[in-house]
Image: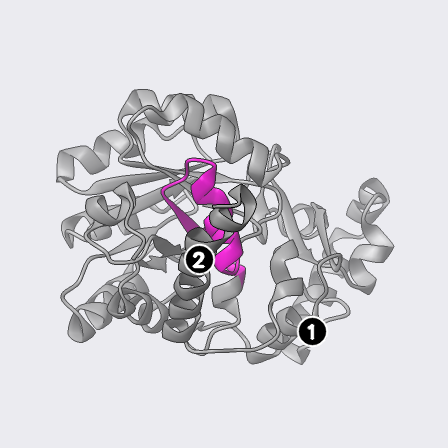
Amino acid sequence: MISTKLCSLLEIDFPIINAPMTGSAGAALASAVTRTGAFGMIGATLEPEPTWLNEQIQAVREKTDLPFGVGFISSAPGITKSVQTALDAKVSAVGCSFIDPTSFISQAKEAGVKSIAQVQTLNDAKRAVAAGADIIVAQGSEAGGHTSYMGTLSFVRSVVKIAGDTPVVAAGGIADGPGLAAVLMLGAEGVWMGTRFVASIEWAGAEWAKGQVVIADADATILTKVYDMLTEAPFPPSVGDRVIANTFTDTWHGRETEMMELQRKLREQIATAVDAEDATTAPVPAGSVSGLIRSVEPASYIIREIMSQAEDILKNRPQALLGN
């Protein structure tokens, strides 16, 4: 059985964390992941009042007394109450992203809650280490949704080298056992997965979006800013948005100046497309690992399959390579 520092720190059996996808990683996914032996996370919404988050935390606790956490888009305004709600509820860990994590980590420490800092640059990783983050998530550009421009393998290895005793978790382009085994060999202590859990029964997003992930190939995604620019999404300039390429991105990616002259009209077009489940225009966040995903499964099945594959590889592949 694979056991890492992450397992010991979070009191879990399997070194897997579901990405706290905003509003769609709710109690159903977090509790299913947690009850299987991994670490479930709720993705807090951007609403200023934490009503939904409170409900989701309580819903997880009705299903399990095992550890779980809450993650935030920390660059968004108006999330102060939601962060405090998670800390007051004494969830096992809280996660921040897209900011200098120093003040967030300090706030978590004061509350006696473990801190997870998702980083996209080495400078942010260094700040997280200096601030005393309990876990650092090194996110590469292969990740779905909002991410940066560093490749996962090189970035994870770079963060591991500066992290000291702080466990590093790999994110971006990982959806199966070989991916988990690969990043463990880089020195990571676990994986943080979003896209694979989008194609899970418990993910609370749209069913049509799950279908788009399942049919997408490895080269079907694009890292773009068109949707964020049009909707004025709260992400720093260094962050892009990986989505499944469609007619809308084909039309406007690379023509952003011209696009912004039509901002109001195109925003309405996107909203209409989402309501109509029109994937030619509506955004579907997904990582390049979509090409490895061909079915929607229960989260428990996904986790157990990944662990079985990884254990088999780590037992047998070294022997085959070394000839022993």
Question: Which contiguous range is marked in magenta?
Answer: 175-195
Q: Is residue 143 left or right of residue 104?
A: right
From what the image shows, is residue 256 above or below residue 290?
above
Residue found 71% across the figure and 47% down from its top: 224
Q: Position of residue 265 (x, y in %)?
A: 77, 60
* The quadrant where residue 127 appears: top left
Q: Which mark is residue 215?
A: 1
Q: Residues within 10 Å of mark 1 (few under 14, many from 20)?
A: some
Expressed as whole percent of the image width and height from the top left, the position of residue 80 reads: 30, 44
- Quadrant housing the N terminus: bottom left
Viewer-nearest residue: 239 or 3: 3
- The stretch drawn in magenta includes residue 299: no
Q: Is residue 231 above or below residue 307?
A: above
Q: Amino acid at mark 1?
A: Ile
Q: Is residue 79 left or right of residue 158?
A: left
Looking at marks 2 and 1 on the same chain, the residue that comes earlier in the sequence is marked by 1
Amino acid carrying mark 2 in the image: Ala
Question: How many dots with numbers?
Answer: 2
Percent position of residue 222, x then y? 73, 51
